[in-house]
Image (cartoon, helix red, strand yellow):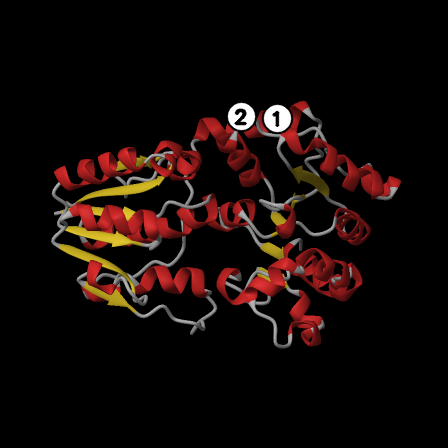
Amino acid sequence: MKILVIQQKMIGDVLISSIICNNLRTAYPDAQIDYLVYASTTPVLEGNSSIDNIILFEEKHRQSKKELLKLGFQIRNEKYDLLIDAYSKLESWILVLLSNAKRKISYKKPGRNFLYTDNVPFEPFPKTNLGLAIERRLSLLEPLNIKTNIDPIPKLFVSEIENQEAKALFAKHNVRQDRKTVMISLLGSEKLKTYPLEFMSKVVDYIADHADVNILFNYFPKQLEEAKIVFDHCKISTQEKIYFDLLGGDLRSFIGLVNQCDLIIGNDGGAINMAKALNKPSFIIFSPWIEKKIWATFEDGIHHLSVHLKDYRDDLFEHKTEKMLKKESLSLYREFKPDFFKDKIELFLNQNLS
């Protein structure tokens, strides 16, 4: 059997959708399982033996109809028996149409159900603490009536060399070994997903005041200015616990660093999803326009907690669409005071640093 899974999106989506590949591997151990993703997301798939081939969806496929069609015919030539489209947008619809796969599964959406042999309901509400992001992906396996046990947890694989390199980096920066280490997911993938920087400074202060820990900032070199703003707004006693210059050189080295940390706190995004896949406790501060019910995965009130402005100021969300919330996101962020959830951060630290 030859299977193609499609998920051209960002790191968090690609990592979470890899559970489809993982469960297909368990159910069909001899199948060829290929995964179509953006080139920038492939580091989170390294070492995953559930995936035989990674097919790259590149910028040229977005910019050129000719290149997109070429990719579609490349997929057609593979003669896939099964195609699972977890992306389900115009770009993937074209690939699905050209694929000629025997069986095609995706979400039930108006106007494009004819493309698929199986259309799965796109559920609006979660049924468990897995969160909609996980539940929706797993629902794409339901038409297959898989008899093996379903594993809902995304996996990241860190080599021994990568672990040793991360430990060496900790040693180089004289990270104290007698303290636990907290990673701060400092910045979101965009400004509308980034908790106001001076507010984040207060969050970091809460952590430093409440626990004697090492603190690492997750940011790219191009985000140095924003990271410095957070650092400069922190108290001197907090700054003394921050290892500001301890950064990974690339995404794989960052994964190695996260694997040496004890927990992660901060903005929702790829860093949080990678930490969860490494079995690290997480505390998420959601953007006002992001639906918590989708990305608050594995929320149990102990190892995984999250906060959203709507938890505290539901009145600000009345009669507002997602489009309206996104437009007002920055002003809504200003209403999301760090004091609202200080007690939750302290609870999270107490439960996961003991």
Q: Check disc 2 and report the residue beneath it.
A: 165
Q: Is residue 61 left or right of residue 331?
A: left
The picture places residue 155, in percent across and down from the top left corner, at 40, 47
Which three-letter amino acid code belongs to the residue tagged 1? Leu
**Residue closer to the observer: 11 or 346:** 11
Q: Which residue lies at the image location 37% right of the left edge and 34% below the top edge?
A: 58
Kindly identify which numbered label has been placed on residue 187. none
The picture places residue 326, in percent across and down from the top left corner, at 61, 59
Q: Check disc 1 and report the residue beneath it.
A: 169
Q: Which residue lies at the image location 80% right of the left edge and 51% below the top edge?
A: 202
Residue 28 in view here: yes
Which three-letter amino acid code belongs to the residue tagged 2? Glu
**Residue closer to the observer: 52 or 213:** 52
Mark 2: secondary structure: helix
Q: Residues within 10 Å of mark 2 (few under 14, many from 20)?
A: some
Residue 147 in view here: no
Label tally: 2
Image quadrant of residue 50? Answer: top left
The picture places residue 142, in percent across and down from the top left corner, at 25, 66
Mark 1: secondary structure: helix
Depicted 329 relative to depicted 49: above or below? below
| Extreme-right residue of the structure | 236
**Could you tell me if the residues under marks 2 and 1 are in contact, i.e. CB atoms within 8 Å?**
yes
Q: Is residue 222 left or right of residue 340?
A: left
